[in-house]
Image (cartoon, rainbow, N blue to C red):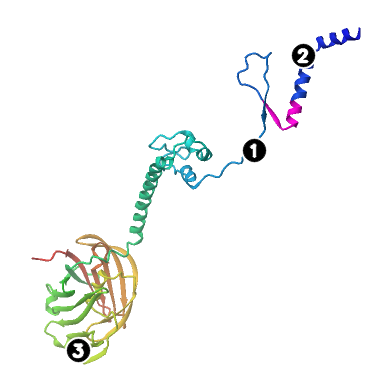
Amino acid sequence: MKLSTLKSHITDNKSLLIAAFISLVLHTFLLSGYSISLPSDIKNITSIHVRLVKVLPEKKPTQPTATQAHQNSIAPNPKVPNNEVPKPDVEVPEHSLNSENTSTSPDIPTNIETTTEPTNSSLKEKLLAEDTTENTTTAETDSSVNTDMTNPYTFVHSEFEVTRGGDSGILGIAYITFNMDSRKNTYQLTSITEPKGLASIFLSKLEQYSEGNVDEKGLKPSYYAYEFGANSGKNQYAHLLWSDGVIEMTSNKGKKSEPLPEGTQDFLSFMYQFMFTPPLNVMQITMTNGKYLRTYTYSFEGEETISTKLGDLKTLHLLKSGENQEKTEVWLALDYQNIPVRIRKTEKDGAVLEQTVTTISTTRPE
């Protein structure tokens, strides 16, 4: 009776018993370090084949090598949105971009670095080219006050209109010619100012002359002359004897000698020295006018655009102050190797003479 009743209960609860048995088996294997893997293509749920698989320790991810890190750091093209990376020119399998697979999978080609490198290099070259363009633009803007000193003119002929103060009337014409012999490393500078119209009645012709050598520091005058018409009482001369370290000056006050400081210029050569040295590098200069030798401190008054008969010229405005309210101002043309294009002289009595350029020629006549 009991046996038949037990069989009856087993028959009625067959599904429950099977489920309990399977649960017991699963818990047993889980606790013993095994796992059960079921086939993915189960077609007949009434027939289940159980396969035991040993559970291995978890494998730590490997660190990518330098080559793999390089492959994964391909910079995006600046023209592509941030969330998109440009595709390389050569088609690469998707798994080759995974550093872990690259180090473990035998199916990945060994020349993967060669495959991806051209794309990375081309992007870098493009970025560098754009950076270079931007830097060049910035450098040109920042260095606008110092033009190229490596190729000074070997010949410059300029003509100026001479006016008094703010008057519009022309008192005269000035001609300044700079001529350098590159083979002998010598130079000659002449300045001739001729009065015109009524001014010729009370003004005399003024001539200045400077000559010397050219070295790595620029102009090195050896002789300067200042001659004011037929009035020999106003004539002044200077001999700069560099080998002896002496300057000899002759004027209506006689002849005198003084030690010759390095870098001394005369009143004519100093305006063309700025073709060879940046005007703002040194703000002091020793000069002679044939009568005396003095060290002047000049100041940078700013960048200015001045109107001339050649059009508007971008210039550097320099000011040299002297004793008794005397001062000399020079405007250097940035687009013409820093040659003077305006010169203003204020005398101790307040009189102002100004020269403004009308013609510039840098071609030596044949």
Q: Position of residue 117 (x, y in %)?
A: 40, 43
Secondary structure of the residue carrying numbered label 2: helix
Q: Position of residue 204 (x, y in %)?
A: 13, 79
Earlier-in-chain disc, 1 versus 2: 2
Q: Position of residue 3 (x, y in %)?
A: 88, 9
Is residue 20 visible to the viewer in this orientation of the structure? yes
Q: In the drawing, does residue 348 fall left or right of residue 75?
A: left
Give the residue number, with chain letter if any, for mark 2.
15
On screen, residue 351 above or below 244:
above
Give the residue number, with chain letter if any, for mark 1.
58
As shown in the figure, which amino acid type bears the numbered disc 1? Glu
| Residue drawn at (33%, 58%) of the image | 140
Q: Range of the magenta residues? A: 26-36
Q: Which quadrant, please, contains the N terminus?
A: top right
Q: Name the one closer to the observer, 77 or 341.
A: 77
Earlier-in-chain disc, 1 versus 3: 1
Residue 167 part of the magenta segment? no
Secondary structure of the residue carrying numbered label 3: strand
The answer for how far apart the CA atoms under marks 1 and 3 are is 100 Å
The answer for how far apart the CA atoms under marks 1 and 2 are is 37 Å
Q: In the drawing, does residue 328 fall left or right of residue 115?
A: left
The mark found on residue 203 in the picture is none
Q: Position of residue 195 (x, y in %)?
A: 13, 74
The mark found on residue 250 in the picture is 3
Q: Name the one closer to the observer, 143 or 80.
A: 80
On screen, residue 5 above or below 28:
above
Earlier-in-chain disc, 2 versus 3: 2
Secondary structure of the residue carrying numbered label 1: loop
On screen, residue 247 above or below 20:
below
Q: Dot 1 surroundings within 10 Å: few (below 14), some, or many (20 or more)?
A: few
| Residue drawn at (53%, 44%) of the image | 64
